[in-house]
Amino acid sequence: MQKQQVKDVPGWVRSLYLFSQTKELWQNSILIPYSLIKGDALSYLAYQSLGRRKYSDIDILIPRCNMKPFEKILISAGFRSTIDLNNQRNTRIFCVSQSHQIPPYIKGIQNQKIEIDINFDMFWGEYEGKRIDISEFLSDTIEIDIYGCKVKTLPPLKAMVQLILHHYKEMNSIYHLAGHNCINYNMFKDVYYLWKNNQEAVSLDKLYAISSEYEIIPYVFYVLYFTNWIFKDTELQKYVEAFRTLEGESLLDYYGLAEKERKPWKVDFQTRLEADNLYEFIRDDLTEADVEKLERNRRIFG
């Protein structure tokens, strides 16, 4: 009988496996500024328990200047980059200049694979606004225990900022819209419970202040609007109204990360939320430049 793949087992089993196999990696990274994002770090913050979120890889946020030291630790721990060796330099230059991440590092153990995604920015490559200093953003990380591993993650307020920017990016990236079901109930559930279970840390005043500092108010409105469209919470509605701007409202029925590639949705949000294949709704609107960009990202990131 074929051995069951780890990805097919319950989320907490997958998580336990991932961290049991990477414990030494986190011990060796203690002096490097980084934060685990999404995965069980988010489960811990949003639901106050591990194993509440299903995920298949480990995501970290790290300053650009610390990527190479961290990559050396990964390599010493048996991980290898998925960058094509024949085009390594060009791929790396493209990722650092045009993206928010580099191709993942992977490690095979028996017939299983552990993948670590390295993010060095919270914005997308096309973003033209004020960038967030990742070193500063990681200056107040907290330590949590994930199945016996001491790891760093973001405090709730900054976790909310990171999650909102991640979701906006996922919901508007042609690459993500074409590749997987990137608009789904669970993503808004994570936002809702991260807010609901940390209301003092993520108070309206605190979230508005940090969003104003980072100049992301329209994106916060966008994600909170759709989150409350689902959950219809009167307290969260106060946040939606506080963050409402003409720019934020103008984003609601469009997709595309860069203004020059932004296009109107032909279907309403309910249809997007329930769809199994979002690509069919955008395929006919893509330009040659969009398709070329999509194929390039597929070659690099899979």
Image (cartoon, rainbow, N blue to C red):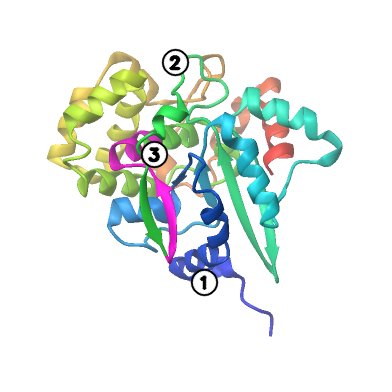
View extreme (bottom): residue:
1
Question: In terms of secondary structure, where does tag 3 sit?
Answer: helix
Q: Which mark is residue 163?
A: 3
Left-right relation of 111 to 22:
right
Pick the front one: 89 or 229:
89
Residue tagged 1: 9
Pick the front one: 37 or 52:
37
Alpha carbons under labels 3 and 2: distance apart: 18 Å
Residue tagged 2: 130
- Label 3 with label 2: CB-CB less than 8 Å: no
- Label 2 with label 1: CB-CB less than 8 Å: no
Left-right relation of 224 to 292:
left
The amino acid beneath tag 2 is Lys
- The reply to whether residue 268 is visible in this rendering is no
Left-right relation of 266 to 189:
right
Alpha carbons under labels 3 and 1: distance apart: 25 Å
Magenta stretch contains residue 72: no
Quadrant where the image shows the N terminus: bottom right
